[in-house]
Amino acid sequence: MKQQSPQWRVTIYLVLLLLATIIANLLASRLADSPLAALILMTSPALAALLTSLITRRSMKDIGWRVTPLKWLGLGWILPIFYALPAYALIWLTGLGGVPNLTFLERARFTLNMPDAPNNLLIIAAFFYITLVNLIPSMLLSLGEEIGWRGFLVPELTKWLGLRNAAWLSGVIWAAWHLPGILSGDYGAQAMPLAYRLACFALMVIASGMVMAWIRMKSGSIIPVAIMHATHNGVIQTFLDRITFDTGKTAYFTGEFGAALLPILLVMAWYVWNQMGKMEAQAA
């Protein structure tokens, strides 16, 4: 394989990603619950991508730094809300999970300095604080992954195997990258069987990864997908999961290891699959 071929670049990237991930997990295990542990883990895909770019003389511009029209930035922000809010609304309405979690409200009152605010106003303020005010710092973390997944891997796989194959395969690699954290018990709820957690998580990651691959290649930028990644983490992990209290089997439906997010995400993945097919036909 030529040094600058996509096959060679992907091979080098996966080898460096494996090494960076092993080292990152070893370092993170020594840092226990420190925020630095998450930072080290989430930047390992970016480190592998940047090193591969240097080794194979891939331009850093190909990562996709350009600012895109507002519609793509807005799409990156709204999509996680679109697939998460209806899922949790159904959970609350059916009693599969309860709302609001009083512990969340107490912490929100303290954080936002709104001690006397009505619950409804407090919840709205917390939502926008998490998804807008906290978006930039969250993006800095998500970029650690997105530089690797959508900045490097998706474009190179697209050159090699086509966009649709790049979309699902990059999602599989993304899901597999999380395995050490899941198997060690550091990431994800422990209440459900491991096979169930792995199945729900893999489907969620592959489906959302396909949507993000389409956005990345359609917009030509990683900024919208970094926004989507950060908003996903904020809306689901920091807001919806924490505002929901357990009613017995709640963990089987909420979060990234539950089933509630999957129906809308799978429909979205099917939609972008068709759109990517049209893009490939136009490029042929």
Image (spheres, rainbow, N blue to C red):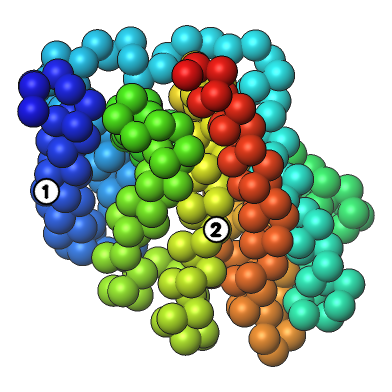
Q: Can residue 271 be seen in this view?
A: yes
Quick check: 168 left or right of 34? right
Where is residue 7 drawn, in percent x and y?
19, 32
Quick check: 22 left or right of 214? left
Q: Tell me which residue sits at (12%, 44%) in the image.
A: 15
Q: In which quarter of the image is residue 194?
A: bottom left
Q: What residue type is labelled 2?
A: Met
**Farthest residue toward the bottom?**
248
Specify the label residue 204 is tagged with.
Answer: 2
What is the tally of numbered marks visible in this picture? Answer: 2
Q: In which quarter of the image is residue 105?
A: bottom right
Q: Tell me which residue sits at (30%, 55%) in the image.
A: 177
Q: What residue type is labelled 1?
A: Leu
**Where does the N terminus fall, quadrant-wise?**
top left
Q: Which of marks 1 and 2 is nearer the N terminus?
A: 1
The relative height of residue 227 versus residue 95 in the rendered view (above or below) is above
Judged from the image, the secondary structure of the residue bearing numbered disc 1 is: helix
Give the residue number, with chain letter if any, for mark 1.
19
Closest to the observer, 270 or 282:
282
Judged from the image, the secondary structure of the residue bearing numbered disc 2 is: helix
Q: Tell me which residue sits at (24%, 42%) in the image.
A: 44
The relative height of residue 62 versus residue 152 in the rendered view (above or below) is above
